[in-house]
Image: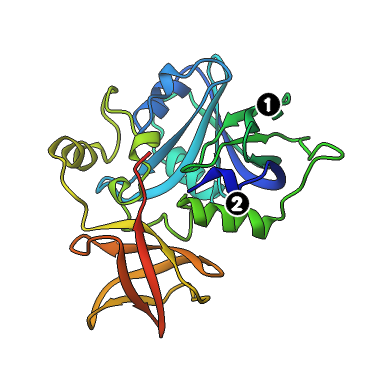
Amino acid sequence: MDESSVTLAATPIMRDVVIVEGADALSYLQTQLTQDVERLPLGGSAWSFILDPKSSIEALVRATRFGTNRVSLDVDPGFGHVVRERLDGLLFRTDARFSEDTWPGVSWRGPAAASRKQDAPIVSLSKWHGVEGIDIVGPDVAVPAGAPMRTHDELEALRIRSGWPTMGYELGPGIQPAMTGLVGVAVSFEKGCYTGQELVARTYHRGAAPTKRLVRLTSDDAFERGVRLMLGGDDVGEVTSVAGGNGLGYLARKVETPAQLGANGRTVTAHDIADG
């Protein structure tokens, strides 16, 4: 999207946080996350998927290394227990301990967002497609006094316009990394094995297109989440998020974009999202 239309502003956010620590914390996470967490420097962050054995997404997390053997995994609210139960339940003779919490934070979006850094356990540059950003998350983080503000609904609309997926809407069971447009930012192809790696690597190295992919949707009229996308009488996808006349959805591989589609009596146009 055109970032010139985006002004710099802050939004208070909440993130579920799972902290993993212990002598084997990094080596264990290396076998479970799509990202190369062992290469993270102290204070460094990276997006990563947690997959099931069939490469279906169980969570999109941000891994932050804030100690030699200490990593936080922050995830969209309501999904911290999913991350902890998935990872904690696989431990066997491994020195890795888990704790779970919910931390407040500030999401800055717009030009020069990186200049708004402040001290916190998680300080992560977080660029959405075409939109600069930084997320600052910790037990005591709050929006600085006098900061320009963006409401949560406005931040959600910006997320949708930029094509960034979220848990419970675009990400979940049956969705694989290649479908999301996030392989370039959340998957490392330079690390060792991890759960679900085989299909991810095969799809990437063969240049194979997934059966469906995430697209941006635009319309002159408001439309609804959950409705089917139709093309000439064929069901070719589903709307997953909406904000007025903008939305996100999954579209079948066979449909080329831009495409004019029906959505429960509305006409929407589907646009591809660049991976990464």
Q: Alpha-carbon distance for marks 2 and 1? A: 26 Å
What residue is shown with label 2?
Answer: 77
The local crowd at label 2, few if under 14, some if 14 to 19, many if 20 or more residues have their Cα within 10 Å, is some
Rendering coords of residue 52 (x, y %): 32, 46
Rendering coords of residue 61 (x, y %): 49, 40
Local secondary structure at mark 1 = helix
The local crowd at label 1, few if under 14, some if 14 to 19, many if 20 or more residues have their Cα within 10 Å, is few
Rendering coords of residue 180 (x, y %): 35, 50
Q: Is residue 62 above or below residue 55?
A: above
Which quadrant is home to the C terminus? top left
Q: Is residue 249 above or below residue 46?
A: below
What residue is shown with label 1?
Answer: 115
Which of disc 1 and disc 2 is earlier in sequence? 2
Local secondary structure at mark 2 = loop
Rendering coords of residue 41 (x, y %): 51, 15
For residue 139, side relative to residue 274 (left or right): right
